[in-house]
């Protein structure tokens, strides 16, 4: 046991002595949480509207005023003719244009109101048009007996993107630290030749493996802790479900990620190769895990691939636990998949981990 | 020309590498073909479940109409709201539509029938889209109902909607030009940096430093090969996008490549700066990764800049990547001319000259 | 203690034979030398005995235990020191020792008596990072790490490569002491003739086979000496020397690595630049090559000031660094073309010169092989050829023969003599004192200062020593710092 303990101490020293790496590992989660929490979102916020008011009537002016008064829209340009609109959109100086035609035009069968929008950002375009239609539509039709629709945003009343991103950020950081850093640190011993001595010593290989993994388990747990505290106290992201179940899920995921790192280290020989291979595994995981892009929107084949990606299960499970606060029984499949992956990866890597050279 | 010998050496080393040539060929193919299909914020296949307390013809028709829409499909019919919530928790449904008792009767009469839409807003975008779709369908259904009954429908003034540049609102078209930028970062930014740090670790850089080659020759020899590869990969990416999705830049190819070139200058110098401050490969890779993630997230590549709060939007102004993504999209999707994206070109050039000055200044041959 | 019979080992699925029919018996308490050129199979044999590799066929026993079946028990009772890099560079001296002690389930205190002699030398630096130690210190530390668990057998694979003569002597005294006092059996490989002669018995290996076993004096072939055919005649004082240094100093903070050195190297001379590890040789050499700026004093190399005109200096010198500095993933021809091109040779010149060199080195068949696939000795000869390919007026060689076997070293010096006769000035550092004797003049650095400078015969006379080792020890003993 003493052997093991001193091995672990040595691993910690390796990590702490590389100040630059340590700094990045600790600062990265803060920066990501800051960005995802405050800066990044998909919501429509400020839309610059160009207005072509050919009617110049009292009503048309009132309409323009109402659009401008809306929180989402601000009228930034007034144009004389619709012909100039497209060039304006192309230059990116307006996001949307509202054309109000003269009564004469309307009599000739043209629509009174025309919305032109920059479709290059598809989601924003769609939402903006819908919002504008609502504003404009309200003025045009005094309400009849329309059914009042009550909309409830479950779990996330303000529809904040941070709720969606926090579990994703945790999933990504853990994968990066556990898989990439672990594999590099093991391969470094191979490259520098110290692995040869460790192998020639009576140290059980299992000690070597566990001692290599443990420090990164600690570093990543610290990171999860920071992210969770920050998101709870600063971003007001709820922890709706059981925190203990969440910890268990996270621990299981960390083990899977560590096992992945271990696996990578057993199949490559150089640090550069370890890095490339882990990136080749991490990048698809980012895309396929539903971290940014919902799994439901993926084509059938990609969605099927995503089922084997541990990050997908972790992020989905974490969202359900943290945000929705579902009963843990709904997560049995998540736990099961992660556990199976952990066992398989560990078994394969321990088998591949050589007690001899070559 | 000494520098030609150096460039030749880099090409030979790239060709000898087992992994790189494969990456160069496969990456554009895989990324352009795969990522736009996966990386879509388009919301489709929303599942809804219904709690119908009315059980009338009208409510049944409404449910049918929702189910018939392209975006929503019925996943379950529940008897109680609690049962529906259970389905939400189990991840079987995204939206719950509750139709109150006497819905049909109230609709005919004067009472306001209260429909309830409860969306799982864990993913806010998705919930927002679900809400918008549902409101539209319900509104349409209501109007149709009114017309059928011969009630005088209120003249809603017709609004014509023109979506410019991307009339199908194809998310893939939105992603392709930005993804082209990603290759450049990986190939022209990462590889020269890792290459130089690799020479440091092996000790061959010392041998180079005692030769009379000049600073600029060494740096050019590290950058030019990868920049050329980057240009080829962009070309391949453009062709793949055309072959697979039928996309082609609306604007001039020359202007597009002008931007690509300036951007190559920028990211390569960034890589050089990092390599000058790092001693080991893992340090260099992690440092590059850290800064690039920040630059990428703040560039508008994944989430629109206009959705950011004011302060963050102002912050993006110092992010050179922002100008590149903006210009690539404008040229590729909107057919912007050089004059249209002149300000972006200026910004990129200014940044590139600053980072180059820094890169050359921090590279020491003689300490 | 060690019993090997008909051992065979191949790599690349049998395509490369590393060991063929090796049979050997080493009794307990012996210091046994494994001697042979690069690629003879020494390292493979070490790894097989250390249970790091599996043999294809044949049997091997260590301490009565089979290397295949009982590898766990063997690992408990052996100490293994592989060539280089066997320390954690980012841990301190003490941390390295403690770590390796606990790996073997023991403590520093328990077996302190074994390493007491070495550790006393290391103790002043126990809080220094291993990566910051000089080459000699690193090897002493590595030996301590291999000894810490009181092994019955020690496997030492070139333990003294890159180590200066004084440290080598100390290391070997320690080995003898351990052998005598504790009866530790040792298997050692080394390229140094004086060390070979200290082994009780040796095995000569060649191409994976053992060609002779016996006491070193009987088995080791007589050493041939290289002779300079045209003796060097120093020119008159009026000609400016190839290298002139006056009070050249380099200071890092308060540490003066190179302390006011003054010397002159004549054109066409072979100048040996000696000194213990950490005496400041590499620092001085880096200043002369224009790689680092002097803090004080000046030097002119090939007529150019190293502080101001360092780019011109670089145009006129060749340099071969301690580490092998050709590109492994380029072929021999491509490396020559690259460096020829860098120095402004045109394609035709490169082609002609290259063919001439390949004939001279007898490597015509290897011209289009990747450098990484060649044995170390060949690489070193190639690196030398590359460094004088552009016909510089001066070439700097930083430990060019480290870890190279005796025969290749002689060939290497033949090349040096040929270059000198063509008029190239040679500035060389080495830890082999026989090589020091090959030089026209030799300087010896101690603690950053040049303490002696003359022709080898006159130095021997001055210090009353029989060979250059004697001269070196006499001076190095006065060293204050390590």
Image: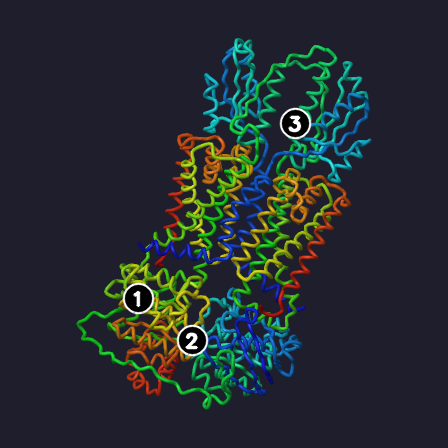
Instruction: Kindly indicate whether the residues beneath marks 3 and 1 are on one polypeptide chain.
Output: no
Is residue A349 left or right of C180 when viewed as pictured? Answer: right
Residue A110: image location, x then y, percent: 55, 14
The chain holding disc 2 is C
The chain holding disc 1 is C
Residue marked by disc 1:
C353
Residue A46: image location, x then y, percent: 54, 28
2 or 3: mark nearer the eye: 2
- Front-most of B224 and C156? B224
Is residue C330 left or right of B119 when viewed as pictured? Answer: left
2 or 1: mark nearer the eye: 1
Residue A328: image location, x then y, percent: 76, 45
Can you see residue A16?
yes
Q: Is the C terminus of chain C in the top left, top right, bottom left or bottom right quadrant?
A: bottom left
Can you see residue C120?
no
Residue marked by disc 2:
C404
Q: Secondary structure at mark 2?
A: loop
Residue A252: image location, x then y, percent: 69, 53
- Front-most of A220 and B228? B228
Q: Secondary structure at mark 3?
A: helix
Q: Closer to the N terminus: mark 2 or mark 1?
A: 1
Q: Is the N terminus of chain C in the top left, top right, bottom left or bottom right quadrant?
A: bottom right
Circle 2 packing at 10 Å, graded few (<14), some (14-19), many (20+), is: many
């Amino acid at each position: 046991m003493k052997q093991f303990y001193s091995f672990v101490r040595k691993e910690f020293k390796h990590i702490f002595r590389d100040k630059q790496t340590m700094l990045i590992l600790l600062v990265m989660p803060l920066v990501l949480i800051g960005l995802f929490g405050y800066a990044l979102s998909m919501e429509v916020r400020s839309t610059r509207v160009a207005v072509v008011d050919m009617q110049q009537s009292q009503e048309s002016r009132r309409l323009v005023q109402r659009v401008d008064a809306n929180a989402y829209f601000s009228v930034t340009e007034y144009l004389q003719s619709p012909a100039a609109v497209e060039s304006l959109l192309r230059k990116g100086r307006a996001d949307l244009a509202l054309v109000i035609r003269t009564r004469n035009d309307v009599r000739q069968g043209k629509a009174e109101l025309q919305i032109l929008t920059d479709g290059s950002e598809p989601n924003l375009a769609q939402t903006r048009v819908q919002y504008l239609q609502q504003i404009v539509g309200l003025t045009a039709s005094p309400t009849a007996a329309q059914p009042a629709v009550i909309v409830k945003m479950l779990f996330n009343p303000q529809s904040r993107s941070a709720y969606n991103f926090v579990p994703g950020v945790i999933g990504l950081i853990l994968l990066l630290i556990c898989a990439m850093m672990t594999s590099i640190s093991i391969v470094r011993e191979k490259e520098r030749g110290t692995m040869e001595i460790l192998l020639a010593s009576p140290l059980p290989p299992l000690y070597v493996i566990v001692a290599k993994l443990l420090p990164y388990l600690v570093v990543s747990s610290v990171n999860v802790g920071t992210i969770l505290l920050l998101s709870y106290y600063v971003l007001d992201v709820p922890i709706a479900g059981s925190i203990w179940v969440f910890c268990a899920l996270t621990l299981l995921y960390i083990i899977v990620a560590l096992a992945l790192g271990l696996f990578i280290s057993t199949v490559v020989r150089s640090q550069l190769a370890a890095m490339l291979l882990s990136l080749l595994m991490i990048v698809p995981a980012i895309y396929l895990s539903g971290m940014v892009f919902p799994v439901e929107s993926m084509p059938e084949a990609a969605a099927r691939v995503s089922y084997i990606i541990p990050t997908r299960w972790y992020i989905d499970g974490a969202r359900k636990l943290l945000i929705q606060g579902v009963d843990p029984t709904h997560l049995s499949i998540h736990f099961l998949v992660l556990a199976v992956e952990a066992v398989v990866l560990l078994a394969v890597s321990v088998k591949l981990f050589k007690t001899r050279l070559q | 020309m000494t520098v030609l010998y150096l460039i030749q050496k880099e090409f030979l080393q790239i060709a000898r590498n087992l992994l790189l040539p494969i990456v160069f060929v496969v990456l554009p193919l895989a990324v352009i073909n795969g990522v736009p299909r996966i990386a879509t914020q388009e919301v489709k296949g929303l599942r809804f479940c219904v709690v119908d307390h009315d059980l009338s013809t009208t409510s049944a028709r409404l449910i049918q109409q929702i189910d018939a829409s392209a975006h929503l499909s019925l996943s379950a019919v529940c008897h109680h709201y609690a049962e529906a919530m259970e389905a939400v928790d189990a991840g079987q449904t995204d939206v719950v539509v509750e139709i109150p008792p006497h819905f049909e009767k109230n609709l005919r009469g004067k009472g306001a029938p209260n429909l309830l839409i409860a969306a799982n807003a864990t993913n806010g975008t998705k919930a927002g889209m679900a809400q918008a779709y549902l409101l539209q369908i319900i509104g349409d259904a209501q109007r149709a109902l009114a017309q059928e009954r011969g009630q005088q429908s209120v003249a809603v003034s017709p609004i014509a909607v023109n979506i410019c540049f991307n009339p199908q609102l194809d998310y893939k078209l939105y992603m392709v030009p930005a993804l082209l930028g990603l290759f450049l970062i990986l190939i022209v930014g990462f590889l020269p940096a890792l290459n130089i740090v690799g020479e440091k670790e092996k000790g061959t850089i010392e041998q180079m430093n005692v030769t009379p080659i000049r600073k600029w020759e060494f740096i050019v020899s590290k950058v030019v090969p990868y920049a050329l590869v980057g240009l080829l990969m962009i070309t391949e990416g453009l062709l793949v996008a055309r072959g697979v999705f039928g996309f082609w830049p609306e604007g001039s190819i020359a202007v597009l490549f002008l931007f690509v070139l300036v951007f190559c200058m920028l990211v390569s110098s960034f890589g050089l700066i990092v390599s000058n401050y790092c001693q080991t490969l893992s340090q260099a890779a992690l440092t590059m990764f850290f800064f690039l993630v920040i630059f990428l997230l703040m560039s508008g590549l994944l989430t629109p800049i206009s959705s950011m709060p004011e302060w963050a939007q102002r912050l993006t102004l110092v992010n050179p990547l922002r100008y590149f993504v903006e210009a690539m999209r404008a040229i590729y999707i909107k057919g912007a001319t050089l004059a249209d994206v002149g300000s972006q070109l200026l910004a990129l050039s200014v940044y590139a000259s600053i980072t180059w000055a820094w890169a050359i200044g921090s590279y020491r041959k003689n300490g | 203690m060690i019993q090997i019979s008909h051992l065979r080992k191949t790599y690349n699925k049998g395509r490369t034979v590393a060991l063929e029919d090796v049979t050997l018996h080493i009794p307990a308490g012996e210091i046994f030398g494994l001697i042979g050129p690069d690629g003879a199979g020494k390292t493979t044999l070490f790894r097989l005995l250390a249970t790091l590799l599996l043999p294809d066929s044949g049997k091997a026993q260590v301490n009565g235990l089979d290397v295949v079946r009982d590898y766990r028990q063997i690992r408990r009772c052996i100490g293994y020191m592989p060539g280089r890099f066997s320390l954690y560079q980012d841990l301190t001296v003490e941390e390295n020792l403690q770590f390796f002690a606990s790996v073997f389930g023991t403590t520093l205190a328990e077996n302190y008596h074994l390493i007491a002699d070495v550790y006393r030398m290391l103790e002043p630096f126990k809080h220094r990072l291993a990566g910051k130690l000089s080459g000699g210190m690193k090897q002493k530390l590595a030996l301590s790490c291999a000894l810490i668990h009181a092994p019955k057998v020690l496997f030492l694979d070139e333990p003294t490569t890159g180590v200066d003569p004084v440290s080598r002597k100390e290391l070997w005294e320690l080995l003898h002491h351990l052998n005598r006092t504790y009866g530790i059996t040792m298997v050692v490989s080394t390229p140094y003739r004086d060390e070979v002669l200290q082994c009780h018995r040796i095995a000569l290996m060649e191409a994976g086979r053992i060609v002779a076993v016996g006491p070193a004096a009987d088995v080791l072939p007589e050493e041939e000496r290289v002779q300079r055919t045209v003796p060097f005649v120093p020119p008159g004082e009026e000609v400016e020397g190839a290298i002139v240094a006056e009070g050249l100093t380099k200071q890092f903070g308060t540490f003066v690595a190179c302390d006011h050195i003054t010397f002159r190297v004549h054109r066409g001379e072979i100048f040996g630049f000696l000194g213990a590890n950490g005496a400041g040789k590499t620092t001085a050499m880096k200043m002369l090559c224009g790689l680092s700026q002097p803090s004080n004093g000046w030097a002119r190399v090939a007529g150019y000031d190293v502080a101001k005109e360092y780019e011109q200096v670089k145009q006129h010198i060749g340099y071969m660094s301690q580490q092998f500095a050709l590109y492994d993933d380029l072929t021999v021809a491509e490396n020559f073309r690259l460096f020829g091109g860098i120095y402004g040779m045109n394609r035709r010149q490169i082609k002609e010169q290259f063919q001439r060199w390949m004939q001279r080195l007898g490597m015509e068949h290897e011209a289009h092989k990747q450098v990484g696939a060649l044995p170390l000795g060949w690489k070193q000869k190639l690196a030398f050829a590359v460094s004088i390919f552009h016909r510089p007026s001066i070439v700097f060689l930083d430990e060019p023969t480290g870890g190279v076997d005796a025969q290749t070293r002689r060939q290497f010096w033949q090349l040096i003599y040929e270059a000198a006769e063509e008029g190239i000035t040679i500035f060389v550092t080495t830890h082999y004192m026989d090589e020091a004797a090959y030089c026209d003049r030799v300087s010896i650095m101690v603690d950053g200062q040049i303490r002696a400078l003359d022709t080898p015969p006159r130095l021997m006379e001055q210090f009353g020593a029989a060979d250059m080792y004697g001269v070196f020890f006499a001076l190095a003993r006065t060293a204050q710092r390590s």
